[in-house]
């Protein structure tokens, strides 16, 4: 995501990020029109009050006509009722509009984030993204709702008051209008400073939120290493930095408000002094001076209110800019304009042809290079090799999380770059080593494999994965909540839920990232049985860390340094005496020694 831009760039952009909100506003034209009409009526009613005051001073009091005064006070009550009704309507329309627009923005940003390629998440922090979804949209809600309403109301009121001031007394109006640039130009300059400080405060708070999110997610590790004090100290420092940034923003806004109110009301006092001289000379009636004074107070109040909401709008502009940065991110993996369809009947054939690839975060180091192999429909192929050999990268490329720099990957005769990524992924099921379990029910977690599946289909998949035996023992069975990241389940139980999810998906290609590497012997046996059921009739690629799991594979590919260095069956590879033979010797001898030690 983009960093904070330089001062010159900030000055150029000002409140422009708020323009991104206009398409959301146009979706609700009736609500916008209702708000504008309510604002206009409220402003017009307010601007009519000084006219009534002038008539009352110049005619009612001078004629000592109590009935005339009573009629005017009656009209003032009616005007108050109109003003109250218009203000209530304005509040309803603008607050509802703010809530509606922010709900749409949150949905759009989250929807867009889910389409971004893994390369984006290689560098972005999930906690910061969540902060933008929550804190920044709240800032925008305030801007679209109350702040925008106050700003628009005061713009209308200020312009109307200035127009009526000119109509009432051109001479005095000239003095006021001449003072406006002296007041407004510093306001704009201060407003830019407020926006820069507001953006910094929001970024600092997002960093603190991201850190808190990461530590809360790893609270068991945190407590196991007794690092509560360390983590608390770091978070306190982050919060303190956010506070200091916020205080700088608040101070800038406070100074902005002081300057605006002092300058504006000083100009009103000056106008009143000049006007009082005209009244004494008889060139201006007392009622006209009162009318002009009220209009000048309205104009001054409007400018003063605008100086305050300018700071709030600057904060909202910073928030809109941060959200715009996310919306401006383009997925690195896109479907072609006219994607080539995959064959209607899936076979599950996979081919890598001279594929080379480097991760965007590490462009100087090739994850795989010159990689070529084929997997026939229904074949089970195991990939083994030391850590960093490129095994997981093969899975990421098959899923088209990334595109190769050279070479091509073909599934069922179609280059995956020419197909829709969604169509490619719909033909693949994966059981990862680090299983993702959601804070939902067991049923929902399995059903994630195929949205819309019936309860019977979900339960059948659980039975095939040997997961039903522990699910039925839970308090509410399939409707039991399994906790965040599945903390209430054991490692073997989480793996079986993932296998049930893959069974439910019923895809022709199956990717297994060593699903049994971290399990005890009993759990491994159960999971292995479930996997064998899952693998039947499917093209399967297994990343194997434990060589005992690949003995039944049709072929074994040995990777090292991002390329295939050996290929064959377990027996033939052991006979070669290469990397695989060395790995096999280490694992099997270590396992045998451990077994003998346990027996003794």
Image: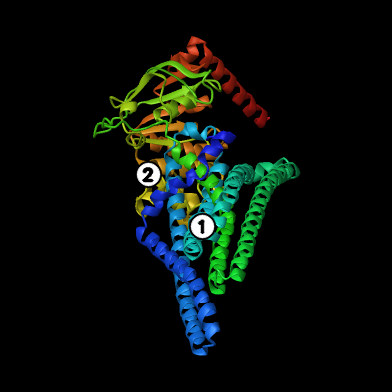
Instruction: Give the colour scheme shown.
Output: rainbow
Q: Earlier in the sequence, mark 2 or mark 1?
A: 1
Neighbour class for label 1 at 10 Å: few (<14), some, many (≥20)? many
| Residue at horizontal 40 percent and vertical 51 percent from the top | 24
In front: 32, or 464?
32
Question: Residue 413: x and y, percent?
Answer: 28, 24
Residue 238 appears at what percent x and percent y?
Answer: 69, 43
Q: Classify residue 237 as left or right of residue 134.
A: right
Q: Which residue occupies the foreground of this view, 313 or 415?
A: 313
| SS type, badge 2 | helix
Q: Quadrant of residue 406?
A: top left
Give coordinates of residue 299: x percent, y percent.
Answer: 54, 61
* Comparing labels 2 and 1, the label whose residue is closer to the camera: 1
Foreground: 284 or 1? 284
The answer to whether any part of residue 515 appears in the image is no
449 vs 210, nearest the viewer: 210
Q: Do the residues labelled 2 and 1 touch (CB within 8 Å)?
A: no
Compared across the picture, whether 404 is left or right of 599 comes to left
In the current view of this chain or complex, which residue is farthest to the front?
Answer: 281
Image vertical order of residue 378 relative to residue 248, above or below: above
Q: Is residue 57 above or below residue 496?
A: below
Query: How far apart are the two marked residues, 2 and 1, measured between alpha carbons?
Result: 55 Å
- The residue identified by callout 2 is 504
Residue on which the image places disc 1: 151
């Amino acid at each position: 995501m983009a960093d904070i831009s330089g001062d010159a760039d900030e000055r150029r952009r000002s409140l422009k990020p708020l323009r991104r909100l206009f398409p959301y506003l146009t979706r609700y034209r009736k609500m916008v029109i209702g708000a504008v009409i309510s604002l206009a009526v409220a402003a017009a009613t307010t601007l009519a009050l000084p006219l009534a005051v002038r008539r009352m001073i110049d005619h009612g009091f001078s004629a000592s006509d109590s009935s005339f005064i009573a009629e005017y006070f009656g009209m003032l009550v009616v005007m108050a009722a109109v003003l109250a009704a218009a203000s209530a309507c304005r509040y309803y329309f603008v607050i509802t509009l703010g809530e509606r627009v922010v709900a749409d923005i949150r949905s759009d940003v989250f929807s867009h984030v889910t389409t971004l390629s893994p390369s984006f998440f290689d560098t972005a922090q999930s906690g910061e993204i969540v902060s933008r979804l929550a804190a920044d949209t709240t800032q925008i809600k305030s801007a679209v709702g109350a702040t925008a309403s106050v700003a628009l109301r005061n713009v209308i009121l200020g312009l109307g008051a200035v127009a009526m001031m000119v109509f009432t007394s051109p001479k005095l109006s000239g003095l006021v209008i001449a003072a406006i640039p002296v007041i407004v130009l510093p306001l704009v300059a201060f407003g830019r400073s407020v926006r820069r400080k507001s953006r910094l405060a929001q970024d600092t708070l997002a960093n603190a939120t991201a850190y808190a999110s990461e530590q809360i997610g790893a609270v068991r590790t945190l407590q196991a290493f007794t690092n509560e004090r360390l983590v608390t100290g770091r978070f306190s420092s982050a919060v303190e930095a956010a506070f200091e940034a916020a205080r700088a923003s608040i101070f800038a806004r406070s100074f902005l408000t002081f300057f605006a109110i002092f300058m504006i009301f000083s100009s009103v006092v000056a106008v009143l002094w000049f006007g009082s001289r005209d009244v004494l000379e008889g060139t201006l009636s007392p009622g006209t001076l009162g009318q002009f004074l009220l209009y000048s107070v309205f104009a001054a109040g409007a400018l003063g209110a605008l100086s305050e909401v300018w700071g709030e709008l600057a904060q909202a502009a910073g928030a809109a800019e941060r959200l715009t940065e996310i919306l401006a991110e383009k997925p690195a993996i896109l479907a072609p304009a006219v994607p080539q369809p995959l064959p209607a009947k899936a076979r599950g054939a996979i081919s890598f042809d001279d594929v080379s690839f480097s991760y965007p975060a590490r462009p100087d180091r090739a994850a795989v290079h010159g990689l070529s192999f084929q997997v026939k429909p229904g074949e089970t192929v195991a990939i083994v090799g030391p850590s960093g050999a490129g095994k997981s990268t093969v899975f990421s490329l098959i899923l088209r999380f990334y595109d190769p720099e050279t070479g091509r990957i073909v599934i069922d005769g179609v280059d995956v770059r020419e197909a829709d990524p969604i169509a490619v992924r719909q033909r693949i099921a994966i059981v990862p080593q680090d299983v993702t379990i959601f804070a939902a029910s067991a049923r929902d977690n399995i059903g994630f494999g195929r949205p819309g599946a019936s309860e019977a289909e979900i339960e059948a998949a659980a039975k095939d994965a040997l997961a039903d035996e522990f699910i039925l023992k839970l308090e509410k069975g399939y409707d039991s909540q399994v906790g965040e990241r599945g903390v209430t389940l054991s490692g073997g139980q989480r793996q079986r839920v993932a296998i049930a999810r893959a069974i439910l998906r019923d895809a022709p290609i199956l990717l297994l990232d060593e699903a049994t590497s971290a399990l005890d012997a009993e759990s491994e046996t159960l999971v292995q049985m479930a996997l064998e059921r899952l693998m039947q009739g499917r093209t399967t690629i297994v990343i194997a860390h434990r060589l005992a799991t690949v003995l039944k594979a049709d072929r074994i590919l040995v990777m090292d340094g991002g390329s295939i260095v050996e290929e064959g069956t377990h027996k033939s590879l052991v006979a070669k005496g290469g990397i695989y033979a060395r790995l096999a010797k280490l694992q099997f001898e270590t396992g045998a020694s451990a077994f003998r030690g346990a027996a003794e």
